[in-house]
Image (cartoon, rainbow, N blue to C red):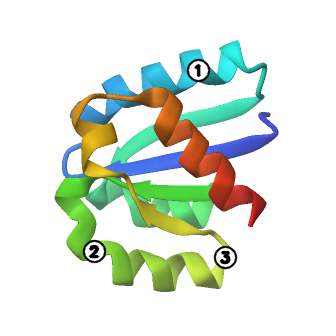
Amino acid sequence: MAEKTIMLVCAAGMSTSMLVQKMQKEAEKQELDREIFAVSTTEADQKIEDAQVDVLLLGPQVRFKKDEYTKKGAEKNIPVEVIEMTDYGTMNGANVLSAAERLMSE
């Protein structure tokens, strides 16, 4: 089991899977033990209940659900943030991983 778990949530879970791969490569490069995965909004609630998630990042396309996920996250002490549009658009795994790490250390 990884030291920390990062969950990304997007509309369908497809485009975010590419970002997950880039984040995993960056985590390996930094020698960080992270489980990083993406789910659709329909799967997210169950994952929050079942999995030990340390941070939840929302894709820009589901930013309208931030309040909903912030409430759910608060119940489990999980910080929630929306991925920066430019980082998502450019699939900048390093920046998104850095944002997740910052949230987990706050």
Pair 1/2: label in front: 1
Residue depicted at 55% across the width and 49% down the height: 99
Pair 1/3: label in front: 1
Q: Which badge, 3 or 2, is on the more N-terminal residue?
A: 2
Q: Residue 25 in the image: state x and y as whole percent.
A: 56, 15
- The answer to whether any part of residue 103 appears in the image is yes
Q: Which badge, 1 or 3, is on the more N-terminal residue?
A: 1
Rounded to the nearest angstrom, the CA distance separating label 1 from label 2 is 27 Å
Asked if residue 26 is positioned above or below residue 103 in the image, the reply reads above
Rounded to the nearest angstrom, the CA distance separating label 3 from label 2 is 17 Å
Q: Residue 78 in the image: state x and y as whole percent.
A: 63, 69
Name the residue type under label 3: Lys
Asked if residue 11 is positioned above or below residue 22 in the image, the reply reads below
Residue depicted at 74% across the width and 67% down the height: 106
Q: Which mark is residue 76?
A: 3
The residue labelled by disc 2 is 65
Q: Secondary structure at mark 1?
A: helix
Report crowding for label 1: few under 14, some 14 to 19, many 20 or more residues within 10 A (C-alpha).
some
Name the residue type under label 2: Lys
| Left or right of 83 in this view: 62 | left
Q: Are marks 3 and 2 in contact (CB under 8 Å)?
A: no
Q: Are marks 1 and 3 in contact (CB under 8 Å)?
A: no
